[in-house]
Image (tube, helix red, strand yellow):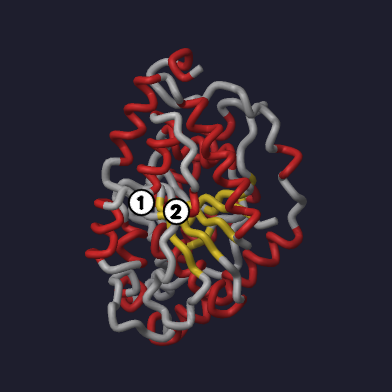
Amino acid sequence: MGQSIAVMNTKGGVGKSTIAMAIAETASVYKHKNILIIDSDPQTSMSIMMMPMTRWEQLERDKKTLVHYLAQSVLGDQTPDWKQFVATKVSDVEEAASLYLMPSHMELSLFERAVSEAGRARKLRDVVRKLLDAAMETFDLVIIDCPPGISILTEIWLREVDYYLPPTKPDYLSARGLSILGRFRELYPKMRFASNLGVVINMKDVRSPIDEEWHRRIASIPENKCFNTAIPRRVYLQRASDYDEGLRSYLAKYPGDAGEALRGLLDEILHRLTQAPSNADLKLTGADAPLVTGDAQGELD
């Protein structure tokens, strides 16, 4: 049985999608893990980072995206096969042969609005729960790339996955994003919520005393469970988000100290996943409770 991780921070611009992709590619290449990435961000950054733009556009035309799967299941009351919405042979890392992607669609926000208007948030949660249960029977890891902020779908991921992993820059606004996520979790303490796998310090300027001070502050809060490994700010990590149709080796995409940091971070992540107790017994806690997001709680029942 695999495990599921939602990668998210309520603050944007923290390198969330790049970190999610890098963790997945590192796990595929160095640990031979079978991994499904679910792009749940209407910005579709993960989708165009993992495949050529033309292929993603074709998947949209063929109605083979996460949004099409959810729309058919939730609004259309159909029972599509989720595997038909999973793209194979993704990633421009030639050694990463065990990665799969359920791509996003820029109309995801419109779908969420339609779900809210139809009062089908509970149906959406049931569909997500079944999708995760089925995917974790097939994959070692299911990684969900969530958008900034907490929408209806993002809240559902956070209540249904095993863990959430929040990347953050070592600065004031990114740290505030972490605190907002923590307060959201505390709104309904009896409702199930994913466990915090740990905060990843990302895009750190190792020469900056200010970055070092904010790293220290974030790591000093026990609830953050901050990983020991920080990911440095490097130009080639920013370029890693540009899909290379010619393919490249892992070390060409993640060279030097950034690649070393990513491999160290993955070791820490896998160690925590191995050591942490199973969350299977928590899946039922508050599973049928109404969601928090929305204009009125009643409309989501």
Residue position for label 1: 64
Q: Is residue 64 left or right of residue 202?
A: left
Q: Position of residue 69 (x, y in %)?
A: 41, 43
Q: Residues within 10 Å of mark 1 (few under 14, many from 20)?
A: many
Q: Is residue 58 above or below residue 155?
A: below
- Under mark 1, the amino acid is Lys
- In 3D space, how far apart are the residues under numbered discs 1 and 2 (Cα atoms)? 7 Å
Residue position for label 2: 84
The mark nearer the N terminus, 1 or 2, is: 1
Q: Position of residue 169 (x, y in %)?
A: 42, 58
Residue 155: mark: none
Secondary structure beneath label 1: loop
Closer to the camera in the image, 258 or 246: 246
Closer to the camera in the image, 215 or 122: 122
Q: Residue at x 32, y 69 (%)?
A: 241
Q: Is residue 94 above or below residue 67?
A: below
Q: Residue at x 48, y 77 (%)?
A: 96
Q: Is residue 98 above or below residue 210?
A: below
Instruction: Give the image quarter of residue 35.
Output: bottom right
Instruction: Give the total number of marks visible in the rendering.
Output: 2
Q: Residue at x 73, y 62 (%)?
A: 274
The reply to whether residue 173 is in sight is no
Q: Is residue 218 above or below residue 154?
A: below
Q: Are circles 1 and 2 on residues that touch, CB within 8 Å?
A: yes
Q: Position of residue 189 (x, y in %)?
A: 64, 28
- Under mark 2, the amino acid is Gln
